[in-house]
Image: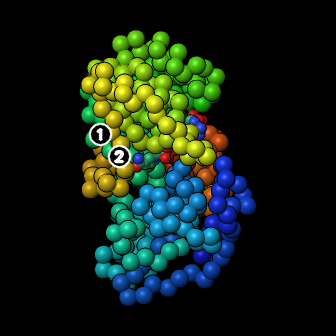
Amino acid sequence: MRDDRNCQWRVAARPVGNVKPTDFTYTEEDIPKPGDGEFLLKTIYLGLAPVMRMYMQGTGAAGERPLEIGDVIHGRGVAEVIESRNPDFRVGEVVQGQCGWQTYKVSRGTPQERFFKCRDYGLPYALSAGVLGMTGLSAWAGFIERGSPKSGDLVVVSGAAGGVGSIVVQMARILGCRVIGIAGGPEKCAFIREIGCEHAIDYKNEDVAARIAALCPAGMDMYFDNVGGEILAASMEHLAFGARVILCGSISEYTRKEPFGLVNYARLRAVDASMHGFFVYNHVENFHRCTDQLAEWINAGKLNPIQDMEQGFERMPDALASLYSGRNVGVQCCRVRQEPDGRPADWRECIKGA
Ligand code: NAP
């Protein structure tokens, strides 16, 4: 990657199945100049999310403008303000927001881009691309605000080794819940036990319905759903009275040709259960309340901020593919440049690949 050029990843083709290298085009441009009311950002980290494949498909997913072939791919990241003609954004400030898959960006700080100033928690800014960014807020909004957890609840989390899932598992433990995690493969199951799951279900090698039935004889109080499909349907069969089903995501369905039709939703009736969807951008007013709390837990050694860090902007397409192949553990991110102020690397010991 050249530092004196704005390097970009653009949509080359609409993905079919998982994304592949030919779906992306790499381009370089001159570094843009900020006009009146604008500021220039230098990207430090980018976060990866399953929704980016939908952006590439040209749907108006997650409230973002539908992408045409040739457009720079949408994506949130952490960036330093290096020039400014906007009084609200000062040179040297570090922000997180809609940078796009590029190494520089000129912005006006519009509401659509949702730029937040990164608070200094004495932690690497890397965390603002994931655990202290929108992934953390997603876990928070779904689990705390929609899930209303109570101490002693039995919580089942799918996608438990992923970005949102690994945070929900740990928040549930901190709040005194018992947690069962679902993940793909023995290594990920060992990992989710390490971060607090009492039991782990390996959906790739075990009968999920039978395992849930065996582990939740009195039903579960909350099911936090990151995957949808058959795992959601299996969980719906084992709800305790008053259970909450939290619809965060349905990654198992995103690459299917036909939508999965949930047929057993009426199970909610039998036990006075409820199903809540949520969208992270509907909760941004709580962004700093959430990051303050997560950072406090991290600094207290209660929450391990697990991020899977790819090294180098050129790795972005591969990093997105990881989410669909299940290679990532924790929040998938990409380091574009080093931390701006040479911060100590203490917390990066828990960032795989750092
Ligand atoms: P993530 O969980 O890190 O996503 C990747 C993981 O999904 C993979 O490591 C893989 O884990 C699992 N996976 C991939 N294909 C799967 C399949 N066919 N069946 C079951 N699991 C599969 O990503 P994330 O960013 O933290 O997002 C988690 C979910 O929340 C996604 O569905 C995402 O779309 C959603 N989300 C929703 C909101 C919102 O506002 N509602 C916000 C953010 C994210 P295994 O190896 O265990 O299979």
Question: Is disc 2 surrounded by few (<14), some (14 to 19) or many (20+) residues within 10 Å?
Answer: some
Query: Image quadrant for the N terminus?
Result: bottom right
Locate residue 39: give its quadrant. bottom left
User: Which x, y percent locates residue 307?
Assistant: 52, 45
Q: Is residue 273 left or right of residue 179?
A: left
Task: Count every numbered label the image shows and give the total.
Answer: 2
Q: Is residue 175 above or below residue 333?
A: above
Tell me if I can see residue 32 in this picture.
yes
Q: Residue, x 56% and y 39% (percent of image)? A: 252
The residue that label 1 is drawn on is 146
Badge 1 element: helix
Q: Is residue 170 above or below residue 58?
A: above
The residue that label 2 is drawn on is 278
Ligand 1 contact, mark 1 (Cβ < 8 Å): no
Ligand 1 contact, mark 2 (Cβ < 8 Å): yes
User: Which x, y percent locates residue 291?
Assistant: 33, 49
Kind of residue at badge 2: Phe
